[in-house]
Amino acid sequence: MYRSISKVLIVMVLLFGTRVFSHQPNQLTYTFTIDSEKLTLKIYFTPKTLLDILEFVQPELRDVPNINLYDHTNQLRDYFGERILLNGHNLKNKISFGRMDLLAHDAYMTFILPRTLDASNSLEIEMNSLTDLYSRLENFVFVKQNGQTTRYLLTEEQRVANWIPNTANDKKQLGFVGSSSSWLVIMFSVCFFCLSMVFLKGKIE
């Protein structure tokens, strides 16, 4: 029981944090950054996630002993482009590469989204990545605009987040976490206190 409580609290700490990485193959973290000049998407994942994706889209790679991930960036771009829907449209053939690091522990890939996508007032985000690979998903979605960050936690059952800047409507969305700094401080304090009590209880027993 204490192990389950600890896991829930750790997930809460990750969700309320300002930056979340992906440390399991079934975890993805998406960060949308909206400004007047461009819209970018940064995806964090593990290298194992990318290997699983490539072996799914190209089954013949399963027999290849060594795979250079950088040789398959276009396949990865197409995979995410087909499975990420913004305002009802997928991103295939509409996104270009930014910076990337596919081999680090905190691996990531950055995409520059099309200027034709109007995301200044609202954005419907639908994530279908990895649903064809894993039965259990943990997807963190961050939307950043004008110094404000809106956070969502999406699962295999709940794949859609509706983002509207600076409104109370977002709070109705599953997994929404506000961006108030005082709220974050309170939540961090409560989480760390609970974690301390759980671990202390485990040591005593």
Image (cartoon, rainbow, N blue to C red):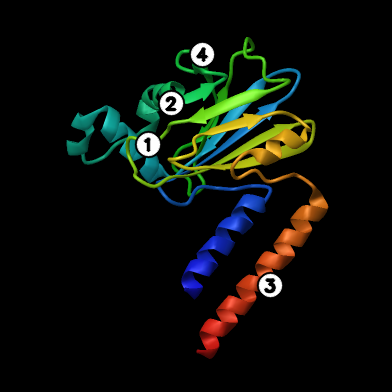
The amino acid type of the residue labelled 3 equals Phe
Q: Which residue is mark 2?
A: 83
Mark 3 is surrounded, within 10 Å at the Cα level, by few (under 14), some (14 to 19) or many (20 or more) other residues, namely few
* Residue 9 falls in image quadrant: bottom right
Q: Which residue is mark 3?
A: 193
Cα distance in 3D space between marks 2 and 1: 9 Å
Residue found at x 48% / y 49%: 105
The answer to whether residue 150 shows anywhere in this view is: no
Mark 1 is surrounded, within 10 Å at the Cα level, by few (under 14), some (14 to 19) or many (20 or more) other residues, namely some
Q: Which residue is mark 1?
A: 131
Residue found at x 50% / y 47%: 22
Q: Which sits earlier in the primary sequence, circle 3 or circle 4?
A: 4
Q: Which sits earlier in the primary sequence, circle 2 or circle 1?
A: 2
Q: Is label 4 or label 2 in front?
A: 2
Q: Which sits earlier in the primary sequence, circle 2 or circle 3?
A: 2
Q: Position of residue 128 (x, y in %)?
A: 43, 31
Q: Which residue is mark 4?
A: 94
| SS of the residue under disc 3 | helix
The amino acid type of the residue labelled 4 equals Lys
Vertical position of residue 8 compared to residue 144: above or below: below
Circles 4 and 2: CB distance less than 8 Å? no
